[in-house]
Amino acid sequence: MFANRRGLLIRLTILLVVAGVVVGVAVPTRARWLPKAQEWLGRAVALVKPSPGRDAKTDEARDEHAGHDHAHDDQNTIELSLQAAKNIGLKTEVVKPRAFERTITVPAVIVERPGRSQIAVGAPLTGVVTQIFAVEGEAVAPGQKLFELRLSHEELVSSQAEFLQLAAEMDVVDLEIKRLEDLGDKVIPGTLLIAQKYEKQKKQALFDARREGLLLHGLTEEQADQVYKTRKPLRTMTVLAPPLQDGEGHAAYEHLFHVQKLNVRQGEQAEVGAPLSILADHCELFLEGKAFEDDAPRLIEAAREHRPLNVRLPGAKPGGEEQVRILFLSDTVEVDSREFHFYMNLPNTIVQETRRDDRRYIAWKYRPGQRMEVLVPVERWEDRVVLPLDAVVDDGAESYVFAQNGKHFDRLPVHVEYRDTQWAVIENDGILEGSMVAVSGAYQLHVALKNKAGGGIDPHAGHQH
């Protein structure tokens, strides 16, 4: 367009110059027409001469862009620069209709599993605590050293002495039997050998009973064998972290306890069975839901069908849910609050591990006492446009989303059928399907569009109450 205009001006300039030359012979009238012709000529030259920082191609491109203004509705379209998109934290995603389950939010709290999450490590025998290997808060593995005791239990001391005495007597009987067998029947009567063998059988029965007594006192099989082989009584005992319980499902990573409490000090006397420490096993916890008794039928149905339920921390962003299944439901209802409790297994993970002075410290993702929310499904809708709540802007009776159109964002009216604290469910009329829409920063786009139009901004627009 600009090129055509420039060509026309050039032709007009040439025509004026030629006309001036033709009539230039009329000297008497030159004073009248020459200044005017020079003024026209200067204007024409200024029009066709490119301005600084601009060339013909740039002007032509601008003119072509100006010819496309009709493709955008200025009242519902705004162009956003890259810097502005970063300033408002703009994020977009493609609209794909899907099913949506309307849910009710039920509060829950993370609790320890009774009889599983806390393990008391007791003193197997009476003794004095001579060494404490663990510290509170430290992570320990099954079989790791916790305490060392100097045994002082009188019954154990006497039992070990009787056990060792009986072991020595059995050695004497064995030697006598071997001596008689070497002499043969011709030298000694056979009844003597038979009598010694009977004696060995009696002592062997008594020896086995003494050994079982040591095990009942708290010694392990290995410790009893050690006493027999070394022929020395056990003076100290090392208390280890217990092994994993049989039948418990544990995660694939290394299983660790953490020392929750130490109940003794070095040099203290510990009676048999006294708790030396409390170990916590938080690889799996319980999630205790607290619903009203009116919600019991839905929960019973979910438990019967083994249906997964979404759970999340309060204020978690969309996508931060985890799926759990109901383990069991309480058989009572709280009299005062009318709450109906139900329980779910909550697998846990280690999110941090540090080492200091050869000790390990861990942090779990979930901890007893944390509050969570359980989403119990109530109704299911098919083929809906489901967007994060921040993608929808309310302005009076209208609700809008912003669809990307090249560098522009077009404001489109939508019908919101349902919304909760995280999601907005929009009627799928086919217009938004496959479009790229703003899922964050939509309110800022709406404000910018209102400012562009020169209208005032409702301070409550886009906010939910």
Image (cartoon, rainbow, N blue to C red):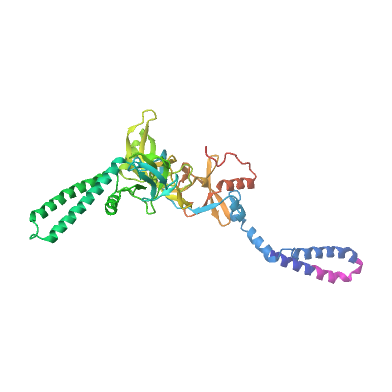
Percent position of residue 191, x then y? 8, 53
Percent position of residue 449, x then y? 61, 47
Q: Is residue 18 magenta?
A: yes
Asked where in the image residue 149 lies, by quadrant, the reply is top left
Q: Front-most of 432 and 447?
A: 447
Q: Front-most of 375 and 429?
A: 375
Q: Front-most of 176 and 413?
A: 176
Asked where in the image residue 116 lies, by quadrant, the reply is top left
With 253 as the anchor, is 67 left or right in this view? Answer: right
With 320 as the anchor, is 341 left or right in this view? Answer: left
Residue 241 seen in this snapshot: no
User: Which residues fall within the magenta stretch?
Assistant: 16-28
Residue drawn at x 45%, y 51% is: 360
Percent position of residue 255, x then y? 38, 51
- From the image, give the main secondary structure of the stretch colored magenta: helix
Q: Front-most of 175 and 267?
A: 175
